[in-house]
Image (cartoon, rainbow, N blue to C red):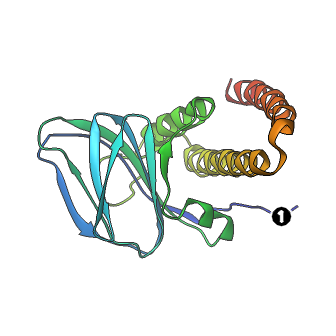
Amino acid sequence: MSDIIRLNKIVAVNCYDISPDFNLESHSHGDWEFLYVDSGTLCYTVCKNQHTLSRGEIVFHKPGESHATQCDGVHSASFFNIIFSSKSRALQCFAGKSMKVPKSLLPILSALISECERTYFVSGERLKKLPDAPSDGEQFVKELTELFLLSLRRHILNTAYNVKSEEFHGKEQNFYDRIAEVFDQLTEKSLVFFLF
């Protein structure tokens, strides 16, 4: 069995409630990062192009990509980000991506954030384990991150397939949509069972 996405290491984890004047200058690092907006609105700049992220949206930064993050100057916001190292080529589907996190994946993301808060100090630059962290916390964080990334990758690929299928098959798309719905229902039931 081969792993499509395998993390080598969790480098940093942060959960921040930030003020309207928050401004993280442009920087880059040698690892992957994703940032999820839990509330409010964030502006982010990638390679001098400015974008906006709202509640429920996520952005990915590939290794070496210059990026900056700031609030809009009026509203506060809260966000979660995780920086991780991985040599998995499958992560390339996230390069340059920002998107709304599908509702079906929110329980996985929520479990990941909760496990991070149980395991690490989540408001520092360097990753530091809590003194009373569960002994299996680091493994849970790594595996929940992999599960979230795999699930989001599948969602992206299925969405791309559905668009392509519609272009080429027209009316046959209803058949593919129904298959995707059944699969999503089965996946949701499996994830609920897995999380509880």
Residue type at mark 1 is Ser
The answer to whether any part of residue 26 appears in the image is yes
State the residue lying farthest toward the front. Answer: 170
Q: In this view, does 107 lie above or below 71?
A: above
Q: Is residue 103 rendered to the left or right of residue 150?
A: left
Q: Which quarter of the image is occupied by the C terminus? A: top right
Residue 181 percent coordinates (x, y): 78, 28
Q: In this view, does 17 lie above or below 86?
A: above
Q: Is residue 49 rendered to the left or right of residue 149?
A: left
Q: Is residue 54 rendered to the left or right of residue 159?
A: left
The answer to whether any part of residue 124 appears in the image is no
Residue 39 percent coordinates (x, y): 32, 32
Q: Which quarter of the image is occupied by the N terminus? A: bottom right
Q: Is residue 124 rendered to the left or right of residue 6?
A: left
Residue 100 percent coordinates (x, y): 49, 40
Residue 137 percent coordinates (x, y): 56, 44
Q: In the image, what residue occupies the spot 74% across and 52% down?
A: 164
Q: In the image, what residue occupies the spot 28% across and 45% down?
A: 42
The residue wearing badge 1 is 2
Q: In the image, what residue occupies the spot 19% across and 35% down?
A: 76
